Image: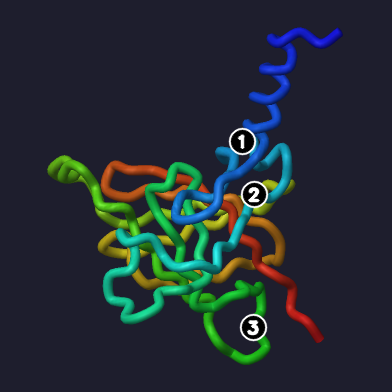
Amino acid sequence: MITWGRLLLGSVLLLAGCGATGDGPAPTAGHPAAAATGCAAHVETGSLPDWADEGFHGDSRMPHVFGARGEIVAVLFGHPLAQVRPDASSNKILWVARPATTSPAAGVSTTLEIIATLDGTDTRVTHEVAAGPGPSIIDMPRAGCWHLDLRWAGRTDTMDLVYAERKP
């Protein structure tokens, strides 16, 4: 016979495994857990959240990926991202940070530092976006799932992005 406690515990565990949808961050694990379990990349295709749609007019539906903590969103103009783009276009990403509740401490760099690690390897690439989150071209040397550690203005977040192989 199942007790109410076991039924409640089973329900909680089941709900814990379900992800949310909408304007919140995609359900992703932090960098170490993501590396152990694979790629947690989740490209949203709905409207950008209100805090990230400045400069967009009308419908702000753009492919985007939320940071695991919801502090930053990567708006993918070059979707899908690819290791080599046959049409010579770019892997353009607009990085938009959630507005900070406090100003960064004096002397703290606003540069967005991206440390990307290819899933299952020791391959690591570093990119910088001067003057903090903003427009960028982020290319990776190999196709696959890249775990990104993001740092800017005393803030941090993580996300996974998938770069596809070039199709013949």
Disc 2: which residue: 40
Q: Residue 33: x percent and y percent?
A: 64, 35
Q: Nearer the viewer, residue 56 or 20?
A: 20
Q: Residue 152: x percent and y percent?
A: 32, 50
Q: Residue 38: x percent and y percent?
A: 72, 46
Disc 1: which residue: 32
Report how far apart the C-alphas of labels 2 and 3 lie in the structure: 23 Å
Going by the numbered disc 3, the residue's amino acid type is: Arg
Going by the numbered disc 1, the residue's amino acid type is: Pro
Image quadrant occupied by the C terminus? bottom right
Q: Specify few, some or many for label 2: CA neighbours under 10 Å numbering under 14, 14-19, or 20 or more.
A: many
Report how far apart the C-alphas of labels 3 and 1 lie in the structure: 29 Å
| Element under disc 1 | helix
> First in sequence: mark 3 or mark 1?
1
Tell me if residue 25 comes above or below residue 166 in the rendering: above
Q: Nearer the viewer, residue 136 or 2?
A: 2
Q: For the point 53% across and 82% down, which residue is it?
A: 90
> First in sequence: mark 1 or mark 2?
1
Q: Is residue 47 left or right of residue 165?
A: left
Report how far apart the C-alphas of labels 1 and 2 lie in the structure: 12 Å
Image quadrant occupied by the N terminus? top right
Tell me if residue 100 comes above or below residue 5 in the rendering: below
Going by the numbered disc 2, the residue's amino acid type is: Ala
Toward which corner of the image does residue 44 lie, by quadrant? bottom right
Q: Nearer the viewer, residue 70 or 109?
A: 70
Q: Specify few, some or many for label 3: CA neighbours under 10 Å numbering under 14, 14-19, or 20 or more.
A: some
Disc 3: which residue: 85
Q: For the point 62% across and 74% down, which residue is it?
A: 80
Tell me if residue 69 comes above or below residue 85 in the rendering: above
Q: Residue 46: x percent and y percent?
A: 51, 67
Q: Nearer the viewer, mark 1 or mark 2?
A: 2
